[in-house]
Amino acid sequence: MRTPPSAPKSPSAGIVLACASLAFAMMAFLASLWWTASPVLGRLYAGIRIAESAGLWLLTSWGRYFTSTPSGAPYEFTSIFNSSVPFGIAATLVTAAIGFLAYRKRATRHLDVVLAEPASGFTTEAILRDLAPVLPHVAVPTGPAANEGCAGTAARPSPNPFTGLRDLRDTRSVSEAVAHLSWQEAATLALLLDAITPLPDCTRRDALLEIAWKAAKPNRAGRQTLPVVAIIQTTLTLAVSELGERNLSALEQAHQILAEAETIHEATAGLASLAQSKRTLILPKFAWLRHFDPLLHEMIVAPGQDARIQFTAANAKL
């Protein structure tokens, strides 16, 4: 049977008495040394105080006392003790300030504190909120605003307002159809169409992606930082209707998919598959979408995953 560990033994009275006697003997030796050799030790002591105070000690009464005493004359026995009191107080305050700053840093910025689990646990929202300062493109999920039905997660696939349009190159008709979409649906279609048939102006292509990222990042009040619906509607209308310097064959395929799908999610899946077949689907461009409409995001990611699986299987056969 294992015996419990014994309690630590306290020092005996003999050891305490020996340590106390040694301390008193040391103090007596230093006192006698100061009594007999104060003319020499006083000059050395004054030099040390002047050096450690950068000369400020000379402005004190004790500094003037130690420097004005004639060479070889003894110093008062209590002078070295009394003159050390201000330095002791100053050193104590500095040590206490350093200790307080170190304690506060340990309590707020130490790795154990930073990684400590919050009271509510490590939720997805809490982790994304902590990453926001260093990863500004990470979007924290937000609920729908009071007068903004386009924010938040879609509960079911949205009807496709492009179904039955006579000509998707009709700017007015496309604009009216886009008005029935949420901003994330409009931004998704604009990015997919640009992936299939890139806009000729690289500046406009970069601006389209920037608008989507800024729209996905709400301000402190939880609302969007831009009038994203109007901006993305205009951008999508131009992306669908513009013909200049674009691949008309690919654009015709995209228009056919967009016009025949019953829901926006089906149209998204078809456009994503078309973009993947052309090796132009860049999934990181749609990373923000999973925080607002996971189902719509899945419509984009699934074709890319299927294509990667097929590509891996083909390589395995070679």
Image (cartoon, grey):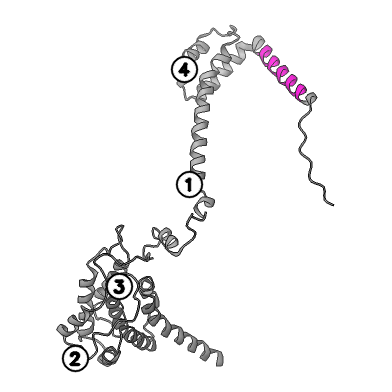
| Residue indicated by mark 2 | 167
Tell me the distance, in whole angstroms, between the alpha carbons under discs 1 and 4: 41 Å
Is residue 152 visible in the rendered image? The answer is yes
Q: Tell which circle, 2 or 1, labels the residue nearer the N-terminal end.
A: 1
| Residue indicated by mark 4 | 58
Residue at point 55%, 89% (across, down)? 316
Is residue 318 visible in the rendered image? The answer is no
Tell me the distance, in whole angstroms, between the alpha carbons under discs 3 and 2: 26 Å
Q: Is residue 297 left or right of residue 197?
A: right
Would you say residue 22 sits in the magenta stretch? yes
Q: Is residue 96 left or right of residue 11?
A: left
Q: Foreground: 35 or 87?
A: 87
Q: Badge 2: how crowded within 10 Å, few (<14), some, or many (20+)?
A: few
At numbered mark 3, what does the secondary structure look like: helix, strand or loop?
helix
Decide: marks 3, 2 in contact (CB < 8 A)?
Answer: no
| Residue indicated by mark 1 | 108
